[in-house]
């Protein structure tokens, strides 16, 4: 059988972190004869070589190549390309891992679209990854019609014949950005690039020990020398003009301007920060013209203009101001309707704890940046106006899986509002309504079982910052925070507040036992009543009226038994007959059984009410936290105190008198 995919992994002293990578490869849905793995050990000095040799001995499709240390990833990746036999070559880092179906899905998608390069959706565990690129599937992506240039890491599939046809290999030696050079060339030479956005293929991991190669402080001279090589590739393969400017703006934005903003600059040692600034300025003034600056957001353009004018102190002052910018969001409404959760919110930026304000000058909205008069004049001379593009401000609401960082964008409708702030200034507030359908939120598919956190991202004037949603909320929000049954087969989705901050999260398909705790807040025990032999109880669930929801009810008592009841659901109420003959004379816990497809059966949750049936067969509903009544204890008559004989009392007095005399002596 033809090998479909060759996985190449450069390995150097990964320690325990290689195990997650290995496990993900062993879980792949491709069969072992459909893919092969090459671990290229680049002179590891830990226990990894022996571990990999053992792995290769146990699995015939896994191979190990040992070589002397080359100092970086380029040479071992090239060694892997030379050894590969697959139609496609996939590069993986030794401390990252793959989704279980990643290789199969990426291969099939690449073949279906005759792609030279296949880019699979990525998630960053503790580190950033591109977001916009993976909003949708892009079967025919190019650097012109998609933000491909935002993703320059090598963790992609490349058709092996394509690499050989153009003699494409990684630059070798101890250097930086060899992946930028390789991937940029691949994008520009490829006949077709396919972006798979509806399945999470690659998990980009931050190691606990902080030793990821990309996180280490670099030598600015060497780093920006290597960056120029990536720019050289773009210049070789494009003509001067808008496309080249667009591609160059990626490096200006990500590798230069963003390093000089906010805490990212301020946390650096002063001498290192100045050296970094000087090297950045060298590239900007040498390689980037006005067309490149025009391609970045307003605040990024301001920083670039200050760099060109060599106004380093203004760069630092602006960084100090930007370090105080924080996104804020308020949850204004929450309600289920037809199995869909509607979320209302408002959002804006704050600076140092106060709302960000803008200035109005005639018909212009202006940023109020803390810049010197010289800086303002210099920017004006460069044609960099401080007009705030507030009409383009918006928000995203993202639902993100807590364990594996899988995330999806929710449909959102936004409106912007101006709020007067005095002295001719104003605030901008964004209101939005989002729709969360648990059965389609995962790119048209249902959200998987687990905890999903909601994240709010505000985008305005070149800032894009993220915060959680829910800690600040309106008074009426709690009333809509009910569990609901969605999908077929039915499963429960529970919105809840996280411990501590109180942010909004979803428990999908009863991943935890939170319903029992949340039921205390979502139910009023006093609303439970008994009418004859029928008990009616409130539910912590949003259910359609007259629905035939598969919710069950039972009464139970430890060491006595469990008695199911025929439950009838009507909206937020469940009714059931009381089998008084079986329940008489005892206090019973009440549990509801809510379906869980993942468990294959109902999960039973105790409600915050108990049912008490007295000896006469009369029943009532009480708060489960009410202590059981104790029968009144009978008051026993006081026992008469025996009277001592007279002689005993006299003997006692004589004894005490003799004792006192002895003490006086």
Image: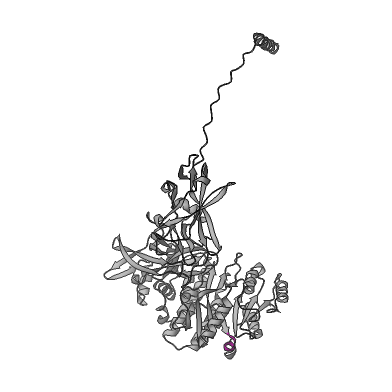
Main SS category, magenta section = helix
Which picture quadrant has residue 93?
bottom right
| x then y, percent, for residue 433 | 37, 65
Residue at image position (44%, 49%) is 534
Q: Nearer the viewer, residue 545 or 461?
A: 545
Boundaries of the magenta span = 159-163
Residue 507 on the magenta span: no
Q: How many marks?
A: 0
Residue 160 on the magenta span: yes
- Asked if one can make out residue 388 in the rendered structure from this viewpoint, the answer is no
| x then y, percent, for residue 251 | 48, 78
| x then y, percent, for residue 85 | 64, 85
69 horizontally vs 294: left or right: right
Q: Nearer the viewer, residue 642 or 630?
A: 630
Q: Nearer the viewer, residue 180 or 381?
A: 180
If the image is split into quadrants, where does the C terminus sit? top right
If the image is split into quadrants, where does the N terminus sit? bottom right
* Residue furthest to the front: 581
């Amino acid at each position: 059988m033809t090998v479909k995919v060759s996985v190449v992994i450069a390995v150097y002293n990964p320690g325990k972190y290689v195990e997650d990578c290995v496990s993900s490869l062993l879980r792949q849905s491709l069969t072992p004869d459909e893919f092969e793995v090459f671990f290229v050990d680049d002179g590891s000095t830990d226990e990894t070589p022996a571990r990999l040799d053992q792995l290769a001995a146990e699995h015939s499709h896994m191979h190990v190549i040992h070589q002397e240390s080359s100092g970086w990833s380029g040479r071992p990746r090239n060694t892997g390309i030379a050894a590969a036999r697959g139609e496609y070559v996939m590069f993986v880092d030794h401390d990252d891992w793959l989704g279980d179906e990643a290789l199969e899905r990426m291969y099939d998608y690449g073949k279906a679209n005759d792609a030279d390069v296949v880019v699979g959706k990525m998630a960053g565990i503790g580190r950033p990854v591109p977001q916009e690129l993976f909003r949708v599937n892009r079967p025919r992506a190019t650097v012109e019609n998609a933000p491909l240039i935002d993703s320059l890491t090598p963790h992609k599939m490349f058709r092996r014949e394509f690499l050989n046809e153009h003699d494409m290999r990684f630059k070798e030696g101890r250097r930086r950005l060899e992946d930028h050079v390789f991937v940029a060339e691949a994008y520009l030479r490829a006949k077709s690039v396919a972006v798979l956005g509806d399945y999470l293929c690659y998990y980009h991991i931050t190691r606990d020990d902080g030793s990821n190669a990309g996180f280490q402080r670099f030598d600015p001279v060497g780093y920006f020398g290597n960056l120029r090589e990536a720019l050289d590739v773009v210049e070789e393969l494009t003509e001067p003009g808008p496309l080249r400017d667009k591609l160059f703006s990626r490096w200006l934005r990500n590798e230069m301007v963003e390093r000089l903003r906010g805490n990212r600059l301020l946390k650096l040692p002063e001498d290192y920060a100045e050296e970094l600034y000087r090297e950045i300025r060298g590239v900007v003034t040498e390689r980037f013209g006005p067309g490149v600056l025009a391609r970045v957001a307003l605040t990024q353009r301001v920083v670039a203009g200050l760099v060109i004018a060599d106004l380093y102190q203004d760069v630092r002052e602006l960084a100090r101001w930007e370090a105080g910018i924080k996104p804020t969001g308020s949850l204004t409404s929450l309600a289920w309707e037809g199995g869909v959760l509607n979320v209302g919110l408002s959002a804006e930026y704050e600076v140092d704890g106060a709302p960000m304000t803008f200035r109005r000058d005639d018909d212009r909205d202006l940023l109020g940046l803390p810049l010197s008069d010289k800086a303002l004049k210099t920017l004006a001379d460069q044609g960099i106006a401080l007009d705030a593009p507030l009409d383009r401000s918006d928000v995203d609401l993202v639902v993100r899986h807590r364990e594996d960082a899988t995330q999806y964008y929710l449909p959102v409708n936004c409106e912007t509002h101006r709020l007067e702030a005095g002295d001719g200034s104003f605030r901008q507030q964004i209101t939005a309504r989002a729709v969360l359908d648990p059965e389609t939120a995962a790119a048209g598919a249902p959200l998987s079982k687990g905890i999903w956190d909601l994240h709010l991202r505000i985008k305005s004037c070149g800032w894009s910052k993220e915060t959680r949603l829910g800690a600040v909320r309106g008074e009426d929000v709690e009333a809509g925070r009910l569990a609901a049954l969605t999908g077929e087969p039915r499963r429960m989705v529970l919105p809840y507040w996280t411990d501590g901050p109180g942010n909004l999260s979803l428990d999908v398909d009863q991943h935890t036992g939170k319903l029992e705790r949340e039921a205390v807040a979502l139910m009023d025990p006093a609303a439970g009543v008994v009418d004859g032999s029928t008990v009616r109880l409130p539910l912590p669930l949003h259910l359609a009226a007259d629905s035939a929801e598969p919710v069950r009810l039972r009464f139970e008592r430890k060491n006595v038994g469990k008695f199911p009841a025929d439950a009838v659901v009507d909206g937020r109420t469940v009714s059931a007959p009381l089998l008084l003959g079986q329940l008489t004379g005892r206090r019973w816990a009440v549990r509801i059984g809510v379906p869980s497809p993942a468990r294959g059966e109902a999960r039973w949750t105790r409600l915050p009410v108990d049912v008490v049936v007295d000896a006469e067969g009369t029943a009532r509903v009480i708060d489960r936290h009410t202590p059981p009544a104790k029968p009144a204890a009978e008051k026993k008559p006081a026992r008469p105190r025996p009277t001592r004989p007279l002689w005993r009392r006299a003997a006692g007095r004589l004894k005490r008198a003799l004792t006192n005399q002895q003490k006086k002596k």
